Image (cartoon, rainbow, N blue to C red):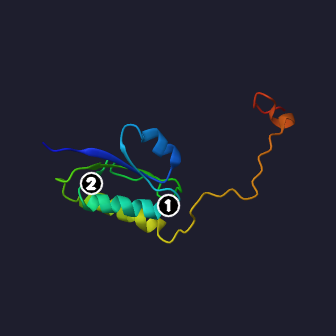
Amino acid sequence: MMRIERIIVTNNPISAETYGGSDRIMYMKNATPYEVYMRVRDLLENGGRLSKPVIRDKTSYYTTVSVFYSETFEPSTGNLREIDAACQATRGVQDYSPKMKRIRQVIDLRRNGPDHRPVA
C-alpha cells in the first residue's frame, strides 16, 4: 500500500503552529524564502508533489509550501519548473526578517471618527 504524507515547509511561525497538529512540519526559523524553496525542491526531486500547481506570492517573506510526499512518486517536471521559478525570484535576497523601520501608525479620530467612517 502506497503511503502518502503531507509535509508543510515554512518559515512562518504561525503556519507552523497552525498545521503542527495534523501534518509533518519542516519549520525553518529565520530562513529566507529562497532557502524554503530550495528545501521544497529537494523534496520534489525525491518523491514530492506540490499540493497546489502554482506558487502565487513568490516575493513574500513568510513562505509556506505544502507538499504531498511518497517514495513511489517520480519527479514532476511541472512542479520542478514552478519551484525553480520561485527560487529564481528569490535568489540573492539576504533579508532574513521583515523589518518595519520608522513606521508610525497614527489614528486621527478627528478625521476618521470613532467608528472609522470619514467625517466631513
Question: What's the distance in space between the residues labelled 2 and 1, CA to CA?
Answer: 21 Å
Q: Residue furthest left?
A: 1
Looking at the image, is 113 positioned above or below residue 2? above
Q: Position of residue 2 (x, y in %)?
A: 15, 44
Q: Which residue lies under the disc numbered 2?
A: 48
Q: Tell how many labels.
A: 2
Q: Residues within 10 Å of mark 1 (few under 14, many from 20)?
A: some
Q: Which mark is residue 19?
A: none
Q: Which residue lies under the disc numbered 1?
A: 31
Q: Secondary structure at mark 1?
A: loop
Q: Residue furthest bottom?
A: 92
Residue located at (27% from left, 52% from top)? 49
Residue located at (52% from left, 55% from top)? 60
Please state if 113 lies on the left or on the right of 64 as rendered. Answer: right
Viewer-side label of 2, 1: 1
Looking at the image, is 8 positioned above or below residue 115? below
Q: Secondary structure at mark 2?
A: strand
Q: Residues within 10 Å of mark 2 (few under 14, many from 20)?
A: many
In which quadrant of the rendered view does residue 6 lie?
top left
User: Dots 2 and 1: beta carbons under 8 Å?
Assistant: no
In the rendered view of the protein, which quadrant contains the C terminus? top right
Q: Position of residue 92 (x, y in %)?
A: 50, 72
Lower sequence index among marks 2 and 1: 1
Closer-to-camera residue (96/29): 29
Kind of residue indicated by mark 1: Ala
Looking at the image, is 12 positioned above or below residue 37? above
Q: Position of residue 33 (x, y in %)?
A: 48, 60
In which quadrant of the rendered view does residue 39 lie?
bottom left
Kind of residue indicated by mark 2: Gly
